[in-house]
Amino acid sequence: MVSNKFYAVVAGIGPGTGRSVALKFAEHYPVVLLARKPESYQDVVAQIKKAGGKALGVSTDATDESALASAFESVKKDVEFENLQLVAAIYNVRPGSRSSRKPFLELTLEDLDTSLQGNLRGLFTFAQSVVPQLLKSVESSPYPPTFILTGATASIRGSINWSVIAAGKSAGRIMLQSLAKEFGPKGIHVAHAIIDGGIDVPDEEHSANNDATPDGKISPFGIAESYWALHTQHKSAFTFEIDLRPFNEKF
Amino acid sequence: MVSNKFYAVVAGIGPGTGRSVALKFAEHYPVVLLARKPESYQDVVAQIKKAGGKALGVSTDATDESALASAFESVKKDVEFENLQLVAAIYNVRPGSRSSRKPFLELTLEDLDTSLQGNLRGLFTFAQSVVPQLLKSVESSPYPPTFILTGATASIRGSINWSVIAAGKSAGRIMLQSLAKEFGPKGIHVAHAIIDGGIDVPDEEHSANNDATPDGKISPFGIAESYWALHTQHKSAFTFEIDLRPFNEKF
Amino acid sequence: MVSNKFYAVVAGIGPGTGRSVALKFAEHYPVVLLARKPESYQDVVAQIKKAGGKALGVSTDATDESALASAFESVKKDVEFENLQLVAAIYNVRPGSRSSRKPFLELTLEDLDTSLQGNLRGLFTFAQSVVPQLLKSVESSPYPPTFILTGATASIRGSINWSVIAAGKSAGRIMLQSLAKEFGPKGIHVAHAIIDGGIDVPDEEHSANNDATPDGKISPFGIAESYWALHTQHKSAFTFEIDLRPFNEKF
Amino acid sequence: MVSNKFYAVVAGIGPGTGRSVALKFAEHYPVVLLARKPESYQDVVAQIKKAGGKALGVSTDATDESALASAFESVKKDVEFENLQLVAAIYNVRPGSRSSRKPFLELTLEDLDTSLQGNLRGLFTFAQSVVPQLLKSVESSPYPPTFILTGATASIRGSINWSVIAAGKSAGRIMLQSLAKEFGPKGIHVAHAIIDGGIDVPDEEHSANNDATPDGKISPFGIAESYWALHTQHKSAFTFEIDLRPFNEKF
């Protein structure tokens, strides 16, 4: 039974976490999927619709202020979303980071800026767009309106070769902590997830209902379940931070 | 539909968290409730049975090695529990701590020992009893066998007047972290909850289905929901630690 | 006895920490003082020279790559510094942050960028300039070459109204942790100081030798002593992080 | 120039940290050395005296309330110490812990109690003995009276096979944090050192003045220098916690 009053938005759709989170929230709400390229969301939008849900993919740079504004304009004009209120926003943007895993002296300011753009400036822009919408839903939302940030081990630890990624990730986490303290008392649930391990990218044989995730990889379906559990927490028992890791991950 | 193969145990039943956790897990499993005095569990056992569940209250000192062994002996002899396997164990014992919130120089070794007995030695004893049982259930359990410890703000921070309580709580948390690292790879989900705020003790007007929890207090039903969410996490996405606090709690 | 082989550099000179750190290190090394405006360093340069030390003030934007390169060029051309090797670098730049202590929805991307420029991009640029110099001094330096970052409470915690400052500060801290792990094994001591409290700005009546700091304020001379203690630590006993707060500060 | 008004006490003397700390503080103060067996302190007492310092070794169980009381009685009766005031107390007791590094299910309550006795109950007892003495010295002490606890990686992290050691160590750390918050405003500097690495035990060829410490081991002289730096911090700039590790230690 998909809501006809409320919707969720997921920024950052790839084959892993973003996709699974969209699928999970689509069991309950119409979902807007934001990604740079249509090919990132097309099949998951189709999959949601096929299962009886509602989904709207929008090509945008979620880290760019005016592009994001345009994206939400187009959501407001969509016949299925125009009257819906936002009750859940997930920021899951992953800047192309592999190339910036380098010794410090080989990095450039551009590497740092790339990490900051996706991990922090984009988060800032996205939060400024969605928080006012979430505030409007506090009274009517079935669960406390929720803002979730996908973090990583680098959000709490700087390791060799991870300097610019960890800088961006940790900055996002601490900025989010400020938001949790500011907007919690106003009724918004702000939460951070430390994803501590590699994500498994499921294929046809590996769905939410089976157990094919190889040891040492995190099932994105598992992440999605925990995000939903965060969203449905009672307002007297908000979690700010969870860690998520495979049973056999060292920590 | 209550399981006829598996059971859960909750050590430490009071009017708050322990009671609510027992009620929640009793929706799925027969539940053993351990408390020093029958009056602590009698009415919740009755409430579970009335709702169609199975519950067994045992008067014991869960922090005492032989008392705890006897308690599990009596579980094994109970006609409804004798063939069940343990899949969830929650340690929720609260040593009578209010009296040990004192300036450091007014405390005695006895105050320290009281905190250690309930928060650490009891946890150790309980864990040594239940972990072998949980290990036996890894293959058959519907969800990864789970061990949850109820912690508090004092588990991560020592404040004025809280020295002996914080010592016991923090020691329990770190011991649990060792267990998470040792038994996670063997399939047991070990988790710690930082309860950051006062617990509301619900009365008749205030059940799991309404919203009567006063601002600034944590609904024990909210805690119970999060414990259940921890228990049902996929083995590729275990959370070791969550914090739980009212939306308007400062942190 | 001021060294005639080695020098130190302090980026960010104001009436508090930067000035005191420069004075302390000038007891042992010639010191380069970097600040945007000459009036920030002129009197402390004079004070160092009067006391028999060597000091060179350079007007530069330490957060700007080419400005910083020019600044180090002018150091290399200075007759007193041209043959000296760098053995200590302190990054103490404080972006004009008071104006960005605002509710989140009143902030702009420009506020975020201002914090990032001073707290992170500048740190990155400065570190890329000084780390190669410090590496060259590993064998000859009397103490392990040292890089110190002045942090704050906001480096480890996001509070209401501190979102953009905390983002920049925490990012700097974690980037520094990466550097500590990468360059420690190469012989450089990388350290972070969490300054937890307001800094007292000393006047004539309040020097390093008396005790006039008002309760609740940190003496910058105290900070300078701890930075020197960090610099002189044995290479087998490096501290990555210290906190510094007044005796009566709550934490 | 050894003080004739003030003294220091070090509880727990072995070939590593305790010995080096006693030697360092003996450069400034008469030092009381507490150890179970005379052979633990005899040669260091002789070494201090030979260097012109004052030292008093007392055989006692520093974790036992009445034994510790007797030990301080004998200090008060010693002709060289009878009129001195305590200004520094270091708790450096290491319970025989190697035998309790075991898989959790092989441990006994006795293993836990051994860890708690040395790491926590002893700390509690020692703190209750020395804090009142330190309070009396606040006005007269040349530096803020100081209480330092030697901690370890296990003080902040529970690892496999370290459950009972980490429980004791982390409990000590958090208890100390309570003391720092309670007694800081009263003028006592309470500090915790996380020793992250193995300690080198120096021999004749390896003194405070050379650099023979093998890579990957911590020189106890380096620890002693940092403890002295903590003791001499200005009261406006107290450090609660430092970490100490070899330059090439992974962290």
Image: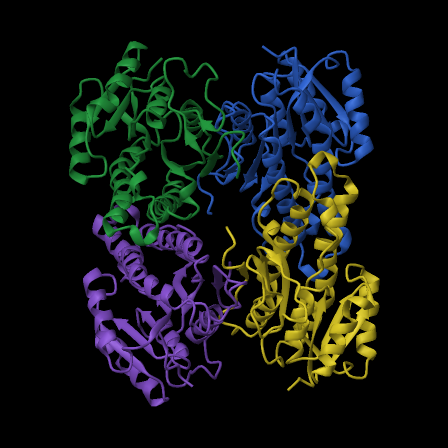
Chain colours: A purple, B yellow, C green, D blue
Name the residue nearer the viewer: D149 or C104. Answer: C104
- In the figure, B243 relative to B23: above or below? above
- In the figure, A170 relative to B211: above or below? above
Name the residue nearer the viewer: B142 or C80. Answer: B142
Name the residue nearer the viewer: C41 or B135. Answer: C41
Question: At which x and y percent is residue D24?
Answer: 58, 22
Q: Which residue is drawn at 56% across and 69% down?
A: B211
Q: Residue at x 78, y 33 (%)?
A: D61
Question: At which x and y percent is residue B22?
Answer: 68, 72
Displayed quadrant of residue A136: bottom left
Count of number-bearing discs:
0
Q: Can residue D124 be seen in this view?
A: yes
Q: Which residue is drawn at 33% across and 83% down?
A: A54
Looking at the image, residue B17 sits to the left or right of residue C53; the answer is right
Displayed quadrant of residue C32: top left
Locate the N terminus of chain D and report the quarter of the image it occupies. top right
